[in-house]
Image (cartoon, rainbow, N blue to C red):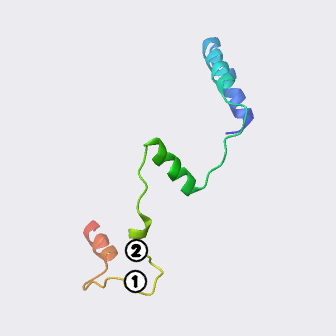
Amino acid sequence: MSVDEVLKAVRALSPKEREQVKALLSALPDEPVPQMTEDEFEQYLAAKGTASIPDRAAEPDLESESYEPVTVAGQPLSEMIIEERR
């Protein structure tokens, strides 16, 4: 949403709603919010108790040479779904 669109939307508000917008804007911090990497954000959420960090060492490495996809007999799942929808 552009600044012009925001101004247009604010002008359409009632005087009481405009005062609420003013109060919310004045409560915003003046300094920019620091940008975090995904790992830093996960650490932040974990420290806050909002989320737990999964153990990435336990996840399979799909690019390693020891990884082998599982082969399944029969027709592909996508074809089975298409047939069932008919």
Instruction: Give the residue displayed 36% in from the left and 83% down from the top.
Output: 69
At which x and y percent is residue 70?
A: 31, 82
**Residue type, mark 1 in image:** Tyr
**Residue type, mark 2 in image:** Pro
At which x and y percent is residue 62?
A: 44, 78
* Mark 2: secondary structure: loop
* Mark 1: secondary structure: loop
Q: How many marks?
A: 2
Residue 41 against residue 76 in the figure, above or below: above
Residue 86 relative to residue 10: left or right: left
Q: As rendered, which of 44 and 60 lies closer to the eye? A: 44
Residue 42 relative to residue 28: left or right: left
At which x and y percent is residue 75?
A: 28, 82
In the rendered image, which residue does mark 1 sit on? 67
- Quarter holding residue 81: bottom left
Q: Dot 2 surroundings within 10 Å: few (below 14), some, or many (20 or more)?
A: few
Quadrant where the image shows the N terminus: top right
Residue 6 against residue 68 in the figure, above or below: above
In the rendered image, which residue does mark 2 sit on? 60
Instruction: Give the residue displayed 60% in from the left and 55% down from the top.
Output: 37
Marks 1/2 in contact by CB < 8 Å: the verdict is yes
